[in-house]
Image: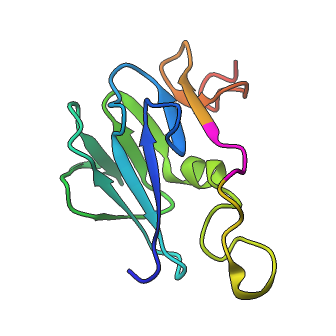
């Protein structure tokens, strides 16, 4: 994968995608996006594991890069997040998403997405309506 941009996912508020769930490790996984649109996920030695859910099948992710697709769901411990939701949270920070010549990535100070577990058990962006229960 050429020119991949790495984003962290974990419970630590400094992660690019912070997930407020105790089953998620401080720095749980890395999500890599390349300028060509390819995406991979890599577990960072988390206690509860990282999983790719695709077409009814579940695949464990080790410390190697696993290719993911827009239609996949990723599970970090007990928290599940759709790949398209991760991309929404990273909008403006992906390769080729920046403004100006050369398609540079916008400054990393763009507001980061924080995630939380809804009362129904789904993970959603903080202060947004839950896509599962609509609360």
Query: Going by the picture, which residue comes out furthest to the bottom?
Result: 102
- Give the color scheme: rainbow, by chain, secondary structure or one colour: rainbow
- The magenta stretch is 109-113
Q: Is residue 112 magenta?
A: yes
Where is residue 55? Give x, y as percent: 36, 54
Question: Does residue 83 appear anywhere in the picture?
Answer: yes
Q: Is residue 9 magenta?
A: no
Residue in the picture at 69% in, 24% down:
134
Where is residue 61? Give x, y as percent: 23, 52
Of residues 16 and 82, the one nearer the viewer is 16
Residue in the picture at 72% in, 44% down:
111
Report the number of discs. Answer: 0
Where is residue 36? Give x, y as percent: 52, 82
Of residues 90 and 79, the one nearer the viewer is 90
- Magenta-highlighted stretch: main secondary structure? loop
Residue in the picture at 72% in, 26% down:
129
Q: Which quarter of the rendering shows the C terminus?
A: top right
Q: Which quarter of the rendering shows the N terminus?
A: bottom left
Residue in the picture at 57% in, 31% down:
115
């Amino acid at each position: 994968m050429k020119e991949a941009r790495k984003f962290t996912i974990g419970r630590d508020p400094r992660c690019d995608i912070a997930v407020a769930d105790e089953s998620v490790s401080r720095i749980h996984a890395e999500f890599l996006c390349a300028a060509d649109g390819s995406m991979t996920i890599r577990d960072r030695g988390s206690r509860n594991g990282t999983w790719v859910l695709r077409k009814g099948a579940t695949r464990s992710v080790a410390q190697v890069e696993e290719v993911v697709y827009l239609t996949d769901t990723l599970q970090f411990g007990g928290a599940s997040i759709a790949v398209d939701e991760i991309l929404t949270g990273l909008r403006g920070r992906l390769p080729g998403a920046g403004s100006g010549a050369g398609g540079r990535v916008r400054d990393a100070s763009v507001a980061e997405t924080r995630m939380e577990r809804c009362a129904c058990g789904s993970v959603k962006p903080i202060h947004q309506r839950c896509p599962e229960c609509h609360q």
